[in-house]
Amino acid sequence: MKNPDTQTVHFEHLGQLKFLLPQLQDLKRQQPAHYTKSIASSLFIESWKRLFYGQHPEKIALKITTKALLALILPGCDAFFFKTAKIAPKSAENILKSAFFEHNKSALATELYQQLYAEIPALIAEFYDNDWDRKPSEFEEKYGFVNALCKQPRAGATKPGVPRLLLVPPEMHADHCLITAVYAVLLSPGFEAKVGLPFLTGLAHHLHNAVLPDCGFAGEIALGNHLQPIIENSRIEALEGVDKNMKKRIVQAITNHENLNNAEGRSSSAADVLDRVLDIKWRVRAASVTEKDVLDDLELVHDGPIKSFQTKVLRNAGL
């Protein structure tokens, strides 16, 4: 095995992404009214459905990453939104292209940006002919682990000998896995990795937690030599209804996690640690927000035809 510290890895792309990656944490907590789960968990389910219906992991990776990035500026603006608002397909496409360009052009590697941008017309076509999801009952039967991961909370912060820090609201495994998968795609150019395998690895790397409650680092230490057999048996249980070929592909993706011998493994490993740390940073930032952050820096009362009236109301109310 090569020493990963001696391998040529380009980390410059992390500087370009440092403002974009933290924003994707928002998708774990946003749930538009017509969603039953967070945007991240909804995209997690959609990713597995597309895999179930035979779509290639690389195509899924590009499509879902495009949707995730669009959701940063237009959360919930999907097929339901555009059709309910009676927006014509061409107008919807122009809206998405403009938003994607403005928000992502300077942050993404050029080739990846072009690949993701090119997904938008296909997204629009699906929005207005949304019939690709035709076997929901069969999917639920074979891929029951997907909904389990949407309900299984992460352990919080744990360390042997130290009381658990339970994070509220809890993060679901589906949220972590989806954002890890998207991060892996965004990081892939810097590791010269193809996007399909890191994305699938991100989706699947906590498959065992569909059966095994997350005990955290302290719990893993307590399980000792029993930990690995428990993880392996939990994966077998989770994949019980999955077709043989797909099962093999999923297991291969999982074994690639933390494999620093190839670009795809390095991409998914980097994505995993970034998501874990950025999740905590999101929570700290949310807990420490100040009036200045919201009222001044984010201009809660922003420019518009009645801003002067609103300003007078607030001034006279002593606010």
Image (tube, grey):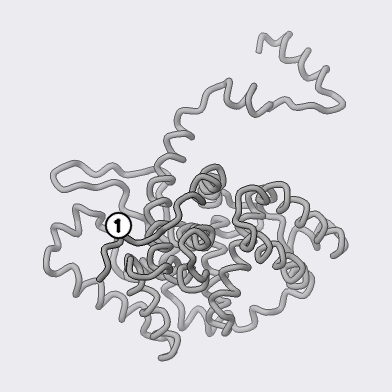
Measuring from the top left, give residue 12's x and y in whole percent: 49, 49
Which quadrant does the C terminus fall into?
A: top right
* Residue displayed at 40% across by 42% down: 280
Q: Is residue 156 left or right of residue 202?
A: left
* Residue displayed at 29% across by 46% down: 157
- Towards the viewer: 113 or 237: 113
**Among the 4 quarters of the image, the one containing residue 124:** bottom right
Q: Is residue 205 above or below residue 240?
A: above
Q: Is residue 214 above or below residue 148?
A: above
* Residue displayed at 43% across by 46% down: 279
Question: In the structure shown, which secondary structural element does the residue marked by tag 1 occupy?
Answer: helix
Q: Is residue 22 left or right of residue 262?
A: right
Measuring from the top left, give residue 147's x and y in whole percent: 46, 69
Residue 256 appears anywhere in the view = yes
Instruction: Name the residue type under label 1.
Output: Asp
Measuring from the top left, give residue 186's x and y in whole percent: 54, 58
* Residue displayed at 41% across by 86% down: 241
Which quadrant does the N terminus fall into?
A: bottom left
Q: How many marks?
A: 1
Q: Residues within 10 Å of mark 1 (few under 14, many from 20)?
A: few
Q: Is residue 295 above or below residue 109?
A: above
**Among the 4 quarters of the image, the one containing residue 209:** bottom left
Measuring from the top left, give residue 297's x and y in whole percent: 63, 25
Q: Is residue 219 left or right of residue 192?
A: left
**Among the 4 quarters of the image, the one containing residue 137:** bottom right
Q: Which residue is mark 1?
A: 5
Residue 29 appears anywhere in the view = no
